[in-house]
């Protein structure tokens, strides 16, 4: 049987753990879960350093403090996994394994067999808890990666339970912790592989979250939090594919907004835009999609909404804007143009029609709602009168 050099593997594991921690620390904007994993890696590395120097250390440091560090590292790993899936952890689940480790190591400080059994069982339970919380949390990223991490964590935990069982059956295999031992060396190698594997997955999940955040930021208006023009048009095209007809579009413009900026400053103007955005969101809720197209101009898509319904929504929104209390000396108002179609194949013509209706509302005195169909009827009547 090949005898693996456990001391060399142990110090190698410590170096790898510290290098992985430094790699994670180099990332800007590290989230709390990643920070907990960094702490766990540093503590694991320090614990392995203690294990490597064990023959030269006092028993309390070499045994009690070493196992305390191991349990503490796995508790921080548990916190890291919990944050990874947006779950909270009870403080007793963090502290209890550490206390049990301290108590059992202190009681059996002169009995290596019982120490190995208790330490293996405690660590095994911690790993099983880590695996369990992954299954219950909300995962960001590939489900396949999640399953791999769950299986790897569960298998490592099972390995510690098997270690405790083997130690009970054949204790002589575990008496010499620091020696050339195939079993001990294999356990160290398994630990190295698991730490590298878990760190890579944490990095991949972190990368996925960052990409998602960047994608979200790129699609939202920085001031109001509504969709920007590009994202609004993209969502409109998606709705067109769903064929949820009839479909109505509202073009909305805050009246005399330039005068508000000139008289009260851009801070008050920005506040007015934010208030309007919130009022529009409250008025539409999940019924449609809202975007800020630029300046004081907004747009709303209402799928499955006919002309009558769209006019009712528009009037509701107009009244909501009119009653906003932004500033004691300011009364807001909004002009709205509405267009509806039951046979639309592209969103652009509907936006143009709603925009024409909006300008008609502005021309007729502002703070009103005009539907493109009504506007077209009026124009037709005017032409008939002229003719």
Image (cartoon, helix red, strand yellow):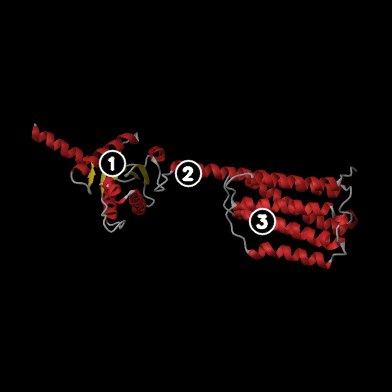
- The residue at the point 75 percent across, 53 percent down is 158
The reply, left or right, for residue 325 in relation to residue 100 is left
Q: x, y (%) of residue 111? A: 87, 63
Decide: few, some or many residues near mark 2? Use Cα within 10 Å; few <14, some 14-19, many ≥20. Answer: few
Q: Residues within 10 Å of mark 3 (few under 14, many from 20)?
A: many
Please indicate whether residue 36 sits to the left or right of residue 237 in the image. right
User: From this viewpoint, is residue 371 visible?
Assistant: yes
Compare residues 85 and 55 and report the one nearer the observer.
55
Q: Which mark is residue 216?
A: 2
CB of mark 2 within 8 Å of CB of mark 3? no
Marks 2 and 1: in contact by CB < 8 Å? no
Q: Is residue 254 visible?
A: no
Question: Mark 3: which secondary structure?
Answer: helix
Q: Which residue is mark 1?
A: 340
The quadrant in which residue 337 appears is top left
**Label 3 sits on residue:** 78
Q: Which sits earlier in the primary sequence, circle 2 or circle 3?
A: 3
Say which residue appears at 26% left-offset and 45% top-offset. Answer: 336
Q: Give SS at disc 2.
A: helix
Question: Residue, x 29% and y 50% (percent of image)?
Answer: 313
Circle 1 or circle 3, nearest the eye? 3
Compute the Cα span from label 2 to label 3.
29 Å
Measured in 3D between alpha carbons, the distance from the residue under mark 1 to the one under mark 3, in whole angstroms, is 54 Å
């Amino acid at each position: 049987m090949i005898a693996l050099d456990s001391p060399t593997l142990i110090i190698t594991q410590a170096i790898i753990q510290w290098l992985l921690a430094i790699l994670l620390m180099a990332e800007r904007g590290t989230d709390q879960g990643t920070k907990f994993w960094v702490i766990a890696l540093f503590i694991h590395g320090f614990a392995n350093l203690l294990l490597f120097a064990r023959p030269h250390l006092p028993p309390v440091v070499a045994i009690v403090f070493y196992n305390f560090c191991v349990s503490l590292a796995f508790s921080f790993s548990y916190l890291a996994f919990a944050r990874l899936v947006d779950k909270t952890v009870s403080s007793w689940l963090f502290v209890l394994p550490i206390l049990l480790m301290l108590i059992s190591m202190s009681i059996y400080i002169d009995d290596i067999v019982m120490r190995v059994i208790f330490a293996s069982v405690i660590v095994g339970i911690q790993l099983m808890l880590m695996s369990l919380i992954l299954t219950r949390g909300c995962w960001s990223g590939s489900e396949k990666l999640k399953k791999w991490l769950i299986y790897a964590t569960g298998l490592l935990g099972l390995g510690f339970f098997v270690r405790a069982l083997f130690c009970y059956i054949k204790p002589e295999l575990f008496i010499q912790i620091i020696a050339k031992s195939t079993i001990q060396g294999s356990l160290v190698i398994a630990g190295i592989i698991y730490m590298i594997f878990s760190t890579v997955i944490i990095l991949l999940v972190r990368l996925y979250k960052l990409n998602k955040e960047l994608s979200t930021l790129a699609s939202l208006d920085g001031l109001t939090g509504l969709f920007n023009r590009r994202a609004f048009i993209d969502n409109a095209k998606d709705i067109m594919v769903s064929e949820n007809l009839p479909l109505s579009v509202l073009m909305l413009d805050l009246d005399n907004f330039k005068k508000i900026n000139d008289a009260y400053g851009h801070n008050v103007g920005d506040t007015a835009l934010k208030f309007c955005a919130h009022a529009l969101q409250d008025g539409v809720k999940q019924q449609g999609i809202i975007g800020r197209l630029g300046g004081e101009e907004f747009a709303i898509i209402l799928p499955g909404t006919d002309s009558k319904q769209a006019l009712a929504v528009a009037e509701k929104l107009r009244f909501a804007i009119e009653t906003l209390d932004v500033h004691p000396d300011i009364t807001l108002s909004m002009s709205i143009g509405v267009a509806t179609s039951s046979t639309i194949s592209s969103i652009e013509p509907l936006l143009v029609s709603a925009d024409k209706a909006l300008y008609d509302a502005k021309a007729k005195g502002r703070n009103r709602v005009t539907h493109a169909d009504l506007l077209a009827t009026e124009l037709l009547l005017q032409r008939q009168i002229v003719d």
